[in-house]
Amino acid sequence: MSMKERILLLYKLNKIDKELSELISLRGDIPAKIEDLSSEKKQLDERANELRAELGDIESAESNVQAENDQLLVKIEKNDELLRSGAVKSNKEYDALAREIEDANIKIRENEKAAKEDNSARKSAIENELILIAGQLEDVNVELDQNLKELDELTKQTGEEEKDLQAERDELIKKIDPEDLAHYDRISSVKYGEAVAVVRKGSCLGCYSSIPPQKAIEIRTADKFYSCESCGRILIAEELIMA
Ligand SMILES: [Zn+2]
């Protein structure tokens, strides 16, 4: 393939890329909004899950305490029966059983107090935050739905054209030398998708700086890649694209 053909391929690629980016720019800030809303939704979901897990932990701790209290009550009752049965003969044994009852009662009261004071405040704080999050999630979901619908509408309108351009691009790329493509991509990424500039009447149409006459003649011969000394774009003589 001649050098001239290689330069022309990059010029055609740039034309397609400009059309594609124009189509994509029609979507405005909707894709960015969708991204923001999605990440907001994810954060809210994560926070809600954390809170639900914490609530679950508190509730299982409470039911553990309840189980412990039930066992303590059984013990108290048993000791009580023993004490009243008259089967306990020694004072030492009597005192031991009585102390166990006392300790169990203290523990039960402690458990109940802790459950009431510590957990109920935290539980209602969690429940309030969950209600708040549910409201926020509803708002985010409504807004997200609206934006997705809008994007869908826009994509429907331009989708066909975009698909054709993309197919054309895919075909074109197969013909382009990988090194040329890498060269193109490098410049394109820093020049906002405008990697190739036309030279018209001794000026680079990419940056409107003038090109020395001798260089303009060389660019027309297209014997190698020329780049604009001020903007760095790949240069192509207008005569080449008109031919
Ligand atoms: Zn230039």
Image (tube, rainbow, N blue to C red):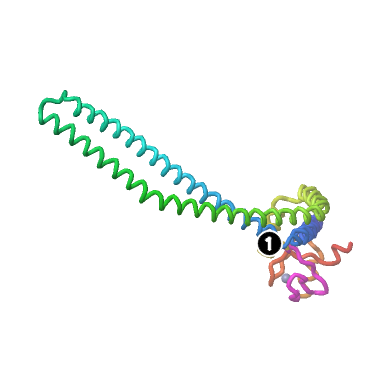
Name the residue at 62% across, 54% down.
138
Q: Kindly indicate the quadrant of the structure image that contains residue 197.
A: bottom right
In this view of the protein, can residue 59 be seen by the observer? Answer: yes
Q: Which structural element holds mark 1?
A: helix
> In this figure, what is the number of numbered marks?
1
Q: Position of residue 13 (x, y in %)?
A: 78, 56
Q: Kindly indicate the quadrant of the structure image that contains residue 200.
A: bottom right
98 on left or right of 169: left
Q: Position of residue 125 (x, y in %)?
A: 45, 54
Q: Position of residue 45 (x, y in %)?
A: 55, 49
The stretch drawn in magenta includes residue 55: no
Residue flagged by tag 1: what amino acid is it? Answer: Ile
Name the residue at 21% across, 26% down.
82
Q: Outermost residue toward the top?
A: 87
Quadrant where the C terminus sits is bottom right
Q: Kindly indicate the quadrant of the structure image that contains residue 239.
A: bottom right
206 on left or right of 57: right
Rendered view: 89 above or below 217 = above
The stretch drawn in magenta includes residue 203: yes
In this view of the protein, can residue 1 be seen by the observer? Answer: no
Along the line of sight, the residue nearer the viewer: 13 or 7? 13
Mark 1 neighbour class, 10 Å CA radius: few under 14, some 14 to 19, many 20 or more: some
Magenta extent: 194-211
Along the line of sight, the residue nearer the viewer: 203 or 215? 203
Q: Main secondary structure of the magenta part?
A: loop
Quadrant of the rendered image holding ligand 1: bottom right
- Which residue in the structure is indicated by mark 1? 187
Along the line of sight, the residue nearer the viewer: 36 or 80? 80
Q: Position of residue 210 (x, y in %)?
A: 75, 76
Rendered view: 34 above or below 64 = below
Name the residue at 50% across, 54% down.
129
